[in-house]
């Protein structure tokens, strides 16, 4: 009976390596999104040569450039979420990444020691994705009446409050450490 128990426990422990598929998929998805965001920036650069041909061309380019750049930032932030998620899963389930511990040049943003740390880091980036997405849609929205402007103001207030409380939570956690 002890042998069966040890085999089952060994199988359960080694099953953590199936998470490696999620790690690889997350990192590849992050790479694809970085390429998509970079393509958005390249589109802006390609079209920037025509922006001084007329005032109308400049205004059209200005609107399109802002949309593409905000989309690129949005995509880069989502890629960041996927990268943090993939690296976090690897550190939590597979093995610690020695390069993170040894590297003195970079910040410790990718260093994850617990599931709570992973959730906290993901939540921060996701809030930023939502802020950028809100900004992207706010630019395209037509403010025809006072109700639309009121809704925009309420949206900005709610985003500001979420960022404030997120930073307030960081102060609270850093005071307890």
Image (cartoon, rainbow, N blue to C red):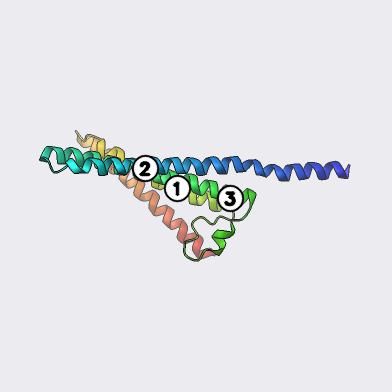
Q: Residue at x 49, y 51 (%)?
A: 121
Check disc 1 and report the residue beneath it.
80
State how far apart marks 1 and 2 are (Cα): 12 Å
For the N terminus, give its image quadrant: top right
Q: Is residue 50 left or right of residue 167?
A: left
Residue 135 seen by the camera: no
| Residue 90 % position (x, y) | 59, 49
Q: Residues within 10 Å of mark 3 (few under 14, many from 20)?
A: few
Residue 120 seen by the camera: yes
Q: Residue at x 59, y 40 (%)?
A: 21
User: Label 1 near label 3: C-beta < 8 Å?
Assistant: no
Residue 111, image quadrant: bottom right
User: Label 2 near label 3: C-beta < 8 Å?
Assistant: no
Q: Upstream in the sequence, badge 3 or badge 2? A: 2
Above-or-below relation of 76 to 103: above
Q: Is residue 21 left or right of residue 47?
A: right
Residue 146, image quadrant: top left
State how far apart marks 3 and 2 are (Cα): 29 Å
Q: Upstream in the sequence, badge 3 or badge 1? A: 1
Q: Is residue 32 left or right of residue 96?
A: left
Which disc, if any, is residue 37? 2
Residue lying furthest right:
1
Check disc 3 and report the residue beneath it.
115
């Amino acid at each position: 009976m002890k042998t069966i128990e040890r085999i089952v426990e060994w199988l359960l422990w080694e099953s953590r390596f199936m998470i490696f598929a999620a790690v690889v998929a997350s990192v590849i998805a992050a790479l694809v999104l970085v390429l998509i965001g970079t393509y958005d920036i390249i589109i802006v650069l390609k079209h920037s040569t025509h922006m001084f041909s007329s005032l109308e061309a400049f205004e059209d380019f200005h609107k399109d450039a802002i949309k593409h750049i905000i989309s690129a930032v949005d995509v880069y932030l989502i890629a960041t979420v996927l990268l943090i998620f993939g690296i976090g899963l690897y550190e939590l389930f597979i093995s610690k990444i020695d390069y993170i511990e040894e590297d003195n040049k970079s910040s410790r943003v990718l260093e994850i020691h617990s599931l709570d740390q992973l959730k906290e880091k993901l939540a921060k980036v996701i809030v930023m994705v939502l802020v950028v997405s809100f900004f992207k849609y706010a630019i395209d929205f037509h403010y025809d009446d006072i109700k639309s402007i009121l809704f925009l103001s309420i949206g900005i207030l709610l985003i500001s409050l979420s960022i404030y409380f997120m930073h307030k939570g960081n102060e609270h956690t850093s005071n307890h450490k």
